[in-house]
Image (cartoon, grey):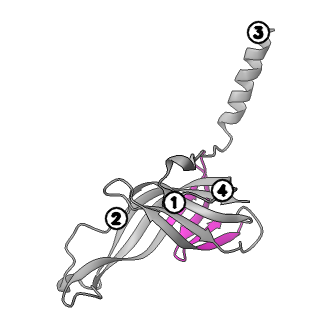
Amino acid sequence: MKKLSTIAAAIALSACAGAPTMMMVDNATLPEPVRVPAGQKLMMSTTGVGEITYECREKKDTAGAHEWAFVAPVATLYSGDKKAVGKYYAGPTWEANDGSKVTGKQLAVAPAAPGNIPLQLVKTEPAMGAGAMVGVSYIQRLNTKGGVAPAMACDAMSKGRRQQVAYQADYVFYGM
């Protein structure tokens, strides 16, 4: 009997090996500002891999000074089994390969490790289209890597110059 249960367990594990994995999030361990409201259920998780574009611009509040300003992100969204399942781009917009998409508004950010863009909580608008994004109400950006403004000089001579910076982040989707 023990041998049969061991074989059944091995078959179950091998069947799951090819299945997409979903990231589990313990919101209680996250910084307060980026926690999802109580009652939200994890629907999907992806890893976004892409780049953020910055532009050298004159600072609005300091004449003659310049800074790298955020322009837009673009990333491919991957499932836990490394399959491309959608894309992320300016809006902010998350679009699944099935054509459904959500846009949203940033509610809060929290610092990440130095050299990484902040963690983020976004409240979404109702989904457009039918598919994976239907019912999504909040999205968290977690486990960020890279994506901060360029370290190169930004001055009057480089005004208008654009620079892409590589980044990666986990996007976790919640709904009721």
Whole-number angstrom distance, CA of label 1 to CA of label 2: 19 Å
120 displayed left or right of 146: right
What residue sits right under mark 4 in the picture? 38
Q: Amino acid at mark 1?
A: Val
- Mark found first going from the N terminus, 1 or 2: 1
What residue sits right under mark 2 in the picture? 148
Residue appearing at x 50%, y 46% in the figure: 29
Q: Amino acid at mark 4?
A: Ala
Of tags 3 and 4, the one toward the viewer is 4
Residue appearing at x 74%, y 64% in the figure: 135
* Mark 1 element type: helix
Q: Residues within 10 Å of mark 2 (few under 14, many from 20)?
A: many
- Mark found first going from the N terminus, 4 or 2: 4
Q: Are marks 3 and 4 in contact (CB under 8 Å)?
A: no
Instruction: Locate residue 5: give its quadrant.
Output: top right
Instruction: Locate residue 159: give its quadrant.
Output: bottom left
74 displayed left or right of 19: left
Whole-number angstrom distance, CA of label 4 to CA of label 1: 12 Å
Of tags 1 and 2, the one toward the viewer is 1
Q: Amino acid at mark 2?
A: Val
Disc ID at residue 2:
3
Q: Residues within 10 Å of mark 3 (few under 14, many from 20)?
A: few
* Mark 4 element type: loop
Pick the quarter of the image with the C terminus.
Answer: bottom right
Instruction: Locate residue 15: give its quadrant.
Output: top right
What residue sits right under mark 1 in the picture? 34
Whole-number angstrom distance, CA of label 3 to CA of label 1: 46 Å
- Mark found first going from the N terminus, 2 or 3: 3
Of tags 4 and 2, the one toward the viewer is 4
Image x and y of residue 104, in percent: 59, 73
- Mark found first going from the N terminus, 3 or 1: 3
